[in-house]
Image (spheres, rainbow, N blue to C red):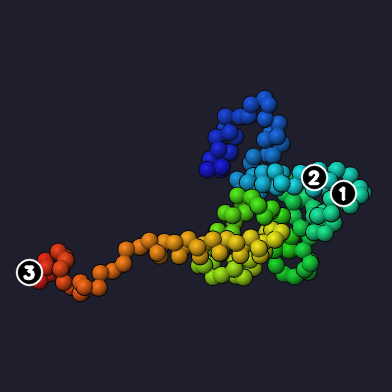
Amino acid sequence: MSSVVFTIVDEIGLPEKADHWRSMKFKHFSAVNTWFLDCQESTYRDEISYLRGAQHRNTNKVPRVRQLGLFLDESGLIRCNGRIHNAPIPESAEFPYLIPANHPLTRLIVLDAHEQLLHSGMNATVTYIRQTFWIPTIRQYATSYHTDEQHEDTTQRSTRPKRNASIKPGEGTEVDNNVDEK
């Protein structure tokens, strides 16, 4: 949906007051990056302003920058310095995107990873997510998500109607009676 909006806005132009959007250079900015940027800007304002400002400021005010080795990439997204600089791995694994733990986008990322891995469990989901994203406290978040999903499965199971044991397979249904007539 976002890419459709970007295409329309690109064709009709931007209003005079849309300086923020004008600076993003639509043609070189994907819809996914826009969601990540919005997510990061709403949560990591201090870190972004520090990274956009002077390089030699005191990192004690923004300890996350120093702890995770944060930097802004060419798209303006916050990335973390990886520990494996010389490994032959994709850039997204070497320098993962920083995403907050308590954000709706994070829930979508966890849900997508969990479903892509065919509900393989928490450890597999966390490992898969960490190939692209760094989400602080992801293990606790994934555990709570996994526990919520198990609770929903149990609730759905308990509300299902139980099978009537007195009816044997092949008896008493209209479909079965029609088969006997042939």
Disc 1 to disc 2, C-alpha distance: 9 Å
Residue beneath disc 1: 61
- Residue 146 placement (x, y as % from top left): 56, 64
* Residue type at numbered disc 1: Lys
Q: What residue type is labelled 2?
A: Asp
- Location of residue 170 in the rendering, given as x and y in whole percent from the top left corner: 18, 73
In the rendered image, residue 138, in percent from the top left (x then y), is placed at 67, 61
State the SS at label 1: loop
Identify the amino acid type marked 3: Glu
Say which label, 3 or 2, has the lower sequence index.
Answer: 2
Residue 11 appears in the figure:
yes
Q: Residues within 10 Å of mark 2 (few under 14, many from 20)?
A: some
* Of 43 and 131, the residue lying toward us: 43
Side of 71 relative to 3 (left or right):
right
Q: How crowded is mark 3: few (under 14 residues within 10 Å), some or many (20 or more)?
A: few
Q: Please, what secondary structure does the residue beneath circle 3 have?
A: helix
**Dot 3 corresponds to which residue?**
181
Q: Mark 2 points at which residue?
A: 46
Determine the residue located farthest toward the left in the rendered image.
181
In this rendering, the answer to whether 47 lies above or below 134 is above
- Cβ atoms under marks 3 and 1 closer than 8 Å: no
Q: Quadrant of residue 159?
A: bottom left
Q: Mark 1 or mark 2, which has the lower sequence index?
A: 2
Q: Which residue is drawn at 32% across and 63% down?
A: 161
Q: Do the residues labelled 1 and 2 touch (CB within 8 Å)?
A: yes
For the question of whether residue 74 can be seen, the reply is: no
Look at the picture and state if 159 lies above or below 73. below
Q: Residue 144 occupies which quadrant of the picture? A: bottom right
Query: Which quadrant does the C terminus fall into?
Result: bottom left
Question: Image point 70% across, 63% down: which residue?
Answer: 93
